[in-house]
Image (cartoon, rainbow, N blue to C red):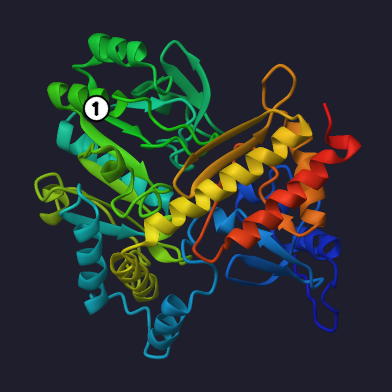
């Protein structure tokens, strides 16, 4: 079936433009996450610093920041100017480029657990490859995972949070049920469950994977000693430990969660903040664990893996991170300011909130009288804030991300708008 838009004027309102998108894009989005919980859709015209402008001309302070990649804000000139210059010289040859070395060397310099790596296009791709490599190295297929941790949407890793015993269920229609037969899932921060899993299945577990900070179901840091215990048990039983640092990498510290907590995994997966908003990811570890790829015994590929434009953004972003000695002090200060001011707004309104933060990643979720997440109330709050010029995701499990483009004044504005919206009758318990 052929559609044509020749001679038609583009819609001028967010609602009309979003509805028209559904004609050409299934569901109106190219990622289900962008449609979750939406009440008042936004169609973006431009973005700069910590603000997005929609096609109606409304400007919003953004606390989502593209789900986390923009640690220096949108349209950071140190990144965009360098990428623009590269594009003028040709950017997709399918051949090695000097940027391969430059970007990879910066990653290995900054991340404690990586001596060698491979680049990929998304966190999902890199995570698939890391799990496959871990199974090849250990020789055992069983994968230990943790409830609430999202590791992309692949057949290997997309699971529901419900389990039958240790066994999770496939996370979407069309997935092969048998894939779950090689996965165990236990609660996060549960040392007893961790010990039991290794006691009962330690000789079968080939790899364990977690986010060092749970970041896709609210922000839940590891309890003291939990990552150390996981590291000890995997090492004792010959299992490969994988850290999914798609969110935490280069965001909670220069070396990610492994540097922050002092626990180095066997394999690390990175994306988001490393690329300044361009599609890129990487997975890597010691030279020994990467040997099957270095010697082409294991398999990893991708036409756009390591494409020049994305690696140019990686090099520009990581070079700026390396040279910004006060970056994480600044981000911590902004995070603390946001946490204090937003927390005060909820307290003044007499509303309970789950407020948890690690560096520049923050969870803000409205709670009901019983202490459970109030999804409907949170969605109403988000819609009201959006109408006043503040955007955060309508699903409370999605974290807020700060950038150096945010100022304390911006965060004061965010907190004040949250306070005003909470004060409205529709947001009282």
Q: Residue at x 39, y 22 (%)?
A: 189
**Left or right for 233, reference 282:** left
* Percent coordinates x, y for residue 113 in the rendering: 20, 47
In the picture, the quarter occupied by the C terminus is top right
**Left or right for 254, reference 395:** left
Q: Secondary structure at mark 1?
A: helix
State whether residue 263 is above or below residue 391: above
* Percent coordinates x, y for residue 96 in the rendering: 23, 75
Q: Is residue 369 visible?
A: yes
* Percent coordinates x, y for residue 88 in the rendering: 42, 90
Where residue 319 sits, quadrant-wise, is bottom left
Depth check: give the residue in front, 203 or 285.
Answer: 285
**Left or right for 228, reference 188:** left
Q: Residue at x 42, y 35 (%)?
A: 157
Depth check: give the residue in front, 299 or 405.
Answer: 405
Q: Which residue is mark 1?
A: 228
In the picture, the quarter occupied by the N terminus is bottom right
State whether residue 256 is above or below residue 95: above
Q: Is residue 39 visible?
A: no
Q: Residue at x 67, y 27 (%)?
A: 373
State whether residue 239 is above or below residue 292: above
Depth check: give the residue in front, 357 or 399.
Answer: 357
């Amino acid at each position: 079936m052929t559609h044509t838009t020749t001679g038609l004027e583009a819609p001028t309102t967010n609602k009309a433009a979003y509805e028209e998108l559904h004609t050409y894009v299934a569901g109106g989005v190219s990622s289900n996450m962008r449609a979750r919980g939406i009440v008042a859709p936004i169609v973006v015209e431009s973005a700069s610093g910590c603000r997005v402008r929609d096609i109606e001309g409304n400007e919003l302070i953004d606390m989502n920041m593209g789900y986390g990649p923009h640690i220096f804000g949108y349209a950071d000139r140190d990144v965009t100017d360098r990428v623009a210059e590269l594009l003028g010289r040709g950017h997709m040859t399918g051949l090695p480029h000097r940027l391969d070395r430059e970007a990879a060397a910066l990653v290995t310099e900054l991340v404690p657990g990586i001596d060698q790596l491979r680049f990929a296009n998304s966190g999902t791709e890199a995570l698939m490859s890391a799990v496959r490599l871990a199974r090849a190295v250990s020789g055992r297929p069983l994968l230990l995972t943790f409830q609430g941790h999202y590791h992309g949407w692949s057949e290997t890793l997309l699971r529901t949070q419900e389990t039958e015993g240790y066994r999770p269920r496939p996370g979407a229609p069309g997935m092969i049920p048998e894939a779950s037969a090689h996965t165990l899932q236990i609660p996060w921060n549960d040392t007893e469950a961790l010990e039991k899993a290794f006691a009962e299945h330690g000789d079968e577990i080939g790899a364990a994977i977690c986010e060092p900070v749970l970041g896709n179901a609210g922000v839940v840091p590891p309890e003291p000693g939990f990552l150390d215990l996981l590291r000890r048990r995997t090492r004792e039983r010959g299992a490969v430990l994988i850290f999914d640092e798609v969110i935490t990498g280069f965001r909670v510290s220069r070396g990610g969660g492994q540097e922050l907590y002092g626990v180095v995994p066997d394999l690390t997966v990175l994306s988001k903040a490393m690329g300044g908003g361009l599609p890129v990811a990487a997975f890597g570890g010691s030279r020994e664990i990467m040997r099957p790829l270095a010697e082409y015994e294991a398999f990893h590929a991708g036409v756009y893996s390591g494409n020049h434009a994305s690696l140019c953004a990686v090099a520009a972003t990581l070079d700026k991170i390396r040279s910004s000695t006060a970056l994480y002090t600044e981000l911590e200060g902004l995070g603390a300011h946001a946490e204090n001011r937003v927390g005060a707004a909820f307290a003044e309104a007499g509303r309970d909130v789950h407020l948890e933060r690690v560096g520049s990643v923050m969870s803000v979720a409205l709670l009901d009288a019983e202490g459970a997440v109030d999804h409907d109330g949170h969605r109403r709050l988000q819609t009201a804030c959006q109408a006043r010029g503040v955007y955060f995701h309508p699903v409370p499990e999605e974290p807020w991300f700060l950038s150096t483009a945010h100022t304390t004044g911006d965060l004061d504005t965010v907190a004040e708008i949250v306070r005003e919206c909470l004060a409205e009758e529709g947001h009282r318990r």
